[in-house]
Every structure is written in C-alpha cells, then in structure tokens.
Amino acid sequence: MKQCSVCKEWKTFDNFCKHKKAKDGYNWSCKQCKAKNDKIYQENNKEKISIQHKKYREENLESILEKNRQDYWDNREKQLNTVKKYAENNKEKIAEYQKKYREDNIERLLIYEKEFHQEKRNTLRAKILEQCYNPKSLDTIPALAYIIKIVCLTTNEEYLKPGVTSYSTDFRYRGYGNFDIQVLTEMFFSSEVEAYAFEQILLQSTKEHYKRMSEYKNFPGYTECRTLDALDILSKYF
C-alpha cells in the first residue's frame, strides 16, 4: 500500500505509475490525481508544450520516423483491421470529409493532378525513347508476372488483378493507403515481351470475370480487375 501525496488516500501500488527516481519505484501521486494535474498543466501551458514537441520532433525526426515504421510493421495486421473497421462504420463521415476537403482545396488539387499526370507522361515518353534508341530493349529487360488481391478499405470491396512489372510488386503498388494489397503469386520472366504476352493470356482467359472498381480513379490498372472467382482460372497458369 502507498499513500497518495495529493488526495492522501492509501491505495495499492497498481494505482500508481512507475517512477525510477522514487525510492519505492512508484510515483508520489496516484494515477487519478496525476491525470488531473497533467490535464490542468497542459491546459495552462499549451503554447509551451507545443514548442517543446516541435523542437523534439525536429531534433529526433529520423529516429521518430524509424520507430513509426517499425511500429507499423510490428502491428500491421492490427492497424489494417482498425482502419478497415473505421471505414466500415464511418462511410458517410469519410465521404463528407473527402468532399469538403476537395471543395476547400480544389485549386491546389487540380494543379497537383495536372503535374502528376504530366510527370507520368514524361516518364512513359522517356521509357519509350530509351527502348527505341538504346540497345537494351524489352527483350532483355526481366519482368515479374503476378496476381494480387486488392481490398478497398473505403468500400470493403475485393478484387483480383493480374499484371506485369519490371520492378518488385511491393514497389509497384507503394503509396496506395486506401487499399490493402496482398501478393498471391509471382512468376519471373527473362524479358518483358514474354511477360506482357503472358499477361494478355491471363486477361483474356478471365475477361468474363471482369469487375469494375468503384474507386478506380485512385488505383492504377483498374480495368484489369477481376472477381475473386477468377483465382481458380488464374492459378492454373502459375
């Protein structure tokens, strides 16, 4: 038992936070009193605390980002389930927020979208020119054919998508936070020509299983999405 220095009540040790500098290893005030005092202090020192947090973040940005990345991968499944559950229970709220955000930032978003699509066109143009004027052609560039399962976290819809990439599949679909992407299978090809020919076979054999993605504006290759039933057909080729 320990007596709280604020309310003077005797309480068990589980009612006190641990404190290294205290002789018994526990804080002088109980958790309830400490919470009240912390709240009063935060309300009276908002600007000071904000400056301290900002300074700490600037001085320790790299370690903070690394810790956040590690925490994410250590708890990825739990975090995805939390996001998915929130999206399911707050569809109207999310839609309203997205609508308001776009209305409030329409000019900035239009500029960003224009620059983004221009950059994509420039990248594609550069790739085509490189293939035309460089001895290293599609015949010598290795590629991966893959099947991924896509879950749209805002609508809870599920899709399959066959495809080809000259990078890793994880790199190809990085940065799409509204989607949970799971790689089901991959096959290596020594050239992109063979890989793209193989992709056409996959798409043609499952065209009856085509499924339109409702969130297609936010996802690349949305015209190649298939229903989950297509997995039996696709699996035969891998």
Image: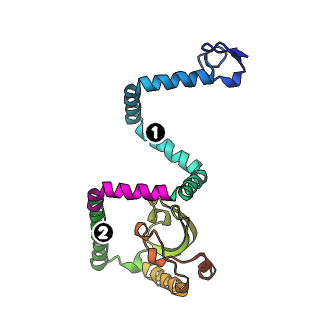
Name which residue lies at 60% across and 51% down: 78
Most foreground residue, 151 or 183 = 151
Image coordinates for residue 177, horizontal then vertical, percent = 47, 58
Q: In whole angstroms, how far apart are the C-alphas of marks 2 and 1? A: 33 Å
Image coordinates for residue 230, horizontal then vertical, percent = 59, 80
- Looking at the image, do the residues carrying marks 2 and 1 touch, with CB atoms under 8 Å apart? no
- For disc 2, the marked residue is 123
Image coordinates for residue 79, horizontal then vertical, percent = 57, 51
Q: Secondary structure at mark 1?
A: helix
Query: Label 1 sits on what residue type?
Result: Ser
Scheme of colours in the image:
rainbow
Instruction: Give, as a single range, the part of the protein colored magenta.
Output: 92-110
Can you say which quadrant of the picture contains the N terminus? top right
Most foreground residue, 197 or 221 = 221
Q: Is residue 108 magenta?
A: yes
Q: Residues within 10 Å of mark 1 (few under 14, many from 20)?
A: few
Name which residue lies at 30% across and 69% down: 123
Query: Label 2 sits on what residue type?
Result: Thr
Q: Earlier in the sequence, mark 2 or mark 1?
A: 1
Name which residue lies at 44% across and 71% down: 216
The quarter of the picture where residue 237 lies is bottom right
Dot label at residue 63 = 1
Q: Secondary structure at mark 2?
A: helix
Q: Residues within 10 Å of mark 2 (few under 14, many from 20)?
A: few
The quarter of the picture where residue 24 lies is top right
How many numbered marks have been drawn onto this rendered protein structure? 2
